[in-house]
Image (spheres, rainbow, N blue to C red):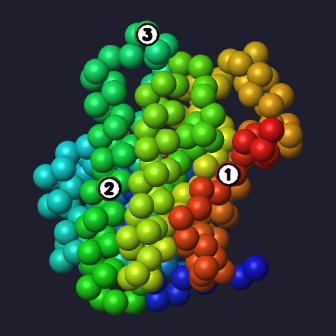
Amino acid sequence: MEISFAGKRALVTGAGKGIGRATALALVRCGAEVTAVTRTRADLDSLVLECPSIRPVCVDLADWDATDAALRDDVVGPIDLLVNNAACASLQPFLEVTPEEFDRSFSVNVKAVLHVSQLVARGMRSRGRGGAIVNISSQASKCALQDHTVYCATKAALDMLTKVMALELGAHQIRVNSVNPTVVMTEMGRLGWSDPAKARTMTSRIPLGRFAEVEDVVNSVLFLLSDKSAMTNGVALPVDGGFLAC
Ligand code: NDP
């Protein structure tokens, strides 16, 4: 299946590392003009070195005002495709969850998605040519994972945010979907699953018997951004080797 984004402009958050970085590079390979947003300048520098056509934007998405200034329509230009990928994760047993961690995680994993999507979707609506948004959720939105109280709760909130966005933005031909991966061994994945014994407890519950690769996630994102999924709106697509099916 050939996917081309020639003539499209895409914005990817959390594009400095892991899944977001690979998504930004894949979008360029498919012909899109890409704006890469993240908060570590060195990651953006190395990304632009790797792919000079990428337009870097350095901002902490937890900062509402700074995000407003960095991503205004007249600053980043019109965007047709948005990937809300940036997120943070930390492990805390339920009884030890701190208010700081709760606020930090919700502000990046949920509030920033709402905010960036508002900024981008307002532009899409005013141009009247529709668009596509993909939110990177997780299997953790639908299945309780040990020590992942806050992360699971943010991703469950994100799934519902995705559905309401699909409902309200559909009238403007803006489709909104999520992908919900199992573990991917990025920096974030290594945080929770580097211990081989722990990793085995997870892979043993995945019918395909392995974690996802970054490319497994990226391919699903590209599909949901593309016209190949023109009638798909409001779904949470597991990329989990069957974990959530069992
Ligand atoms: P990484 O930690 O490897 O990369 C996350 C990226 O997001 C980094 O570039 C990071 O920048 C950026 N980011 C985080 N917080 C902010 C912020 N406040 N402002 C701007 N940028 C920010 O994560 P992954 O690639 O693994 O994860 C990508 C997405 O996939 C996330 O939504 C995650 O929840 C989801 N996911 C990941 C899974 C996994 O096992 N890896 C499984 C399921 C879902 P910096 O390094 O500077 O903080």
Residue in the picture at 32% in, 56% down = 114
Residue in the picture at 26% in, 43% down = 62
- Residue hosting label 1: 238
* Residue 182 percent across, percent down from the top left: 67, 41
Callout 1 secondary element: strand
Q: Could you tell me if residue 23 is visible in this image? A: no
- Residue 149's place in the image compared with 173, above or below, is above
Q: Earlier in the sequence, mark 2 or mark 1?
A: 2
The amino acid type of the residue labelled 1 equals: Pro
- Residue 84's place in the image compared with 7, above or below, is above
The amino acid type of the residue labelled 3 equals: Leu
Q: Closest to the observer: 20 or 223?
A: 223
Which label number is shown at residue 114? 2
* Residue 82 percent across, percent down from the top left: 43, 67
> What quarter of the picture does the C terminus occupy?
top right
Callout 2 secondary element: helix
